[in-house]
Amino acid sequence: MRPWLVPARRGPESVAVRAAEATPEQLVATGALVGGYGRDPVDGDTGYKPAGLAGRTVPYWTAEKARTASVAGYRSNPMARAIIDTYTSFCVGDKGLSLQVTNPQVRVIAEEFWNDPRNRLGSMQDLMLRDQMVMGEQILELMSGPATGVTRFSPIDPQSLSHVTLLHGNPLWPDRLWIRSNVDGIDEFGGRGLQVAQVDDLTGLRSGEAIFWAPWRTLLTDVRGMPFLTPVLDWLDSYDTVLSNLIDRTSLARYMVWDVTVNGSQGDVDNFVARRGGTHIPPSGSVEVHNETVQWKPQNAQTGAFEDTAANANVLTNIASGTGLAKHWLAEPEHTNRATSNSMAEPVRRRLRGVQATWLNQQTEFVRFAIDQAVAAGRLPRTVSALDPQTGEEYDIPAAQAVTVTGPEIAAADAQVNAEIMLNLSTGLMQLVETGVLSVAGAKVAARKAWEDYVGVPYEASLDSPDANPGDVATHIDDNAPDNTTVLKTNVRPMQRTPPVNAVIRPAATGR
């Protein structure tokens, strides 16, 4: 695969220009060149701007080439697969995602949609996230029964998407997807139109014919998405090229070459070759007998392994930084000590959490769409009662708002750290309350906020009791933890063994 976003350099002049700014080829390929300067790649006009273009749209051929290279990379390049699999493994985990529902009626509909044998969302999270990262976009055609409210979906290849029309020209409001098709329904746009799922301003319910996700967009005015691996596709190709060349040279170097010197004239050389029967290499384990006028010297070819290893290490650094991962997560762990590994972990975790948060928001909206379809079919009321996990009070909310999709904890190894933070915070809150610096109400708010931030599950009013049993606390965590029960138990057990941690609950209890 020849690099296409990083074109070949053409002499020292182009090297100097390339070091200072992007090449014209890159500006055209990435869609960064909208107008004002530069030349139209079609007819050479200067200062051009495509008619009707609101932003800096990536050319369709760039996007499709990036998707093709991403699919090929995941299927054939081990480093590309490692990047994608690392993200999917951390974001959805080995057990997938879970539903958090605050109303029993809504729970029935949400679990019905989530576990539908035709949908199987619970077991498809890894595949769905991988598909979105590789393709950069995800289109799901929605099929809802108007009488039953049951929702199912069918994926559509983004390559089939001709274009997206916007509501009132707002790039943040995609209105219809136009799919290239030969079936009935083709109109003047040359495709089949699907209404993008969105909240109806009149009914307050989500409706539509398709879901369109394009999370990795560069600008606010971008409409289409690009594959997650786009910035490192050329570098992945370079990494593979250097490694392949090294393997080829190593294989060639295994062929032994002998330099034979015969003292005398060319006739003596010809006679020596004739008596041997040719210039063939002596068979392995054989004995070659000669006098002192003949010298045999083996020739060793240099593979350049040291230089190639250093070059690939530099390329891998760029690949890892471009994808938000630490290099030792992908390869070369022997060059990283524990201190360096820990110091580099936090930026990586934040990048992983960002991708996970995007995915969880998408899946939450997906399930809420199914809930709204059940409401429209009369299977659920428009509003349902929900229990505030902090105050224990009941209130009415739209049915769709009662469900949230949660994922596994990214940094499972931080459980002990979180427990220590809770311990120190609880001790500090006790001292602040006793000295009168902090009111009981303030300590109550701080304690609940700390609980949700460091334990990871909603705080419930039942935990305010001064006689709360640590075992009941652990049970509450187990029941509400989607996928990280072991991690949360680690957070709770120090609380059981260390009495001062009970202060996290006591300030809230004394305020009642």
Image: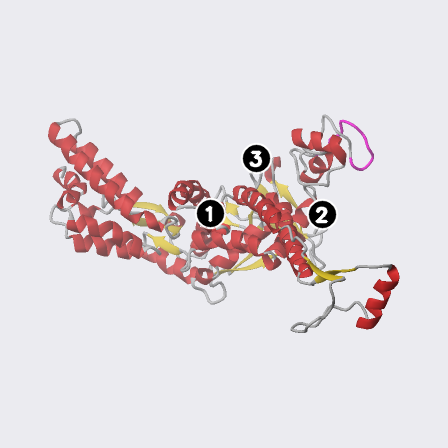
Closer to the chain start, of discs 2 and 1, is: 2
Q: Which residue was labeled with disc 3?
A: 220
Q: Quadrant of the C terminus?
A: top left
Q: Is residue 308 visible?
A: yes
Type of amino acid under label 3: Leu
Q: Could you tell me residue 296's position as x and y percent? A: 72, 62
Type of amino acid under label 1: His
Which element carries disc 3, helix, strand or loop? loop
- Residue 209 lies in magenta, yes or no? no
C-beta proximity under 8 Å, tags 1 and 3: no
Q: Could you tell me residue 41's position as x and y percent? A: 78, 36
Task: Identify which residue is drawn at 76% across, 35% down.
Answer: 11
Query: How far, Cα to Cα, is label 2 from label 1?
Result: 56 Å
Q: Which residue was labeled with disc 2?
A: 189
- Residue 47 lies in magenta, yes or no? yes
Q: Could you tell me residue 495's position as x and y percent? A: 19, 48
Closer to the chain start, of discs 1 and 3, is: 3
Q: Which residues are magenta?
A: 41-52
Query: How far, Cα to Cα, is label 2 from label 3?
Result: 25 Å
Q: Could you tell me residue 135's position as x and y percent? A: 60, 51
Q: Nearer the viewer, residue 319 or 393?
A: 319
Task: Identify which residue is drawn at 25% across, 41% down.
Answer: 421
Query: Which disc number belongs to residue 335?
Result: 1
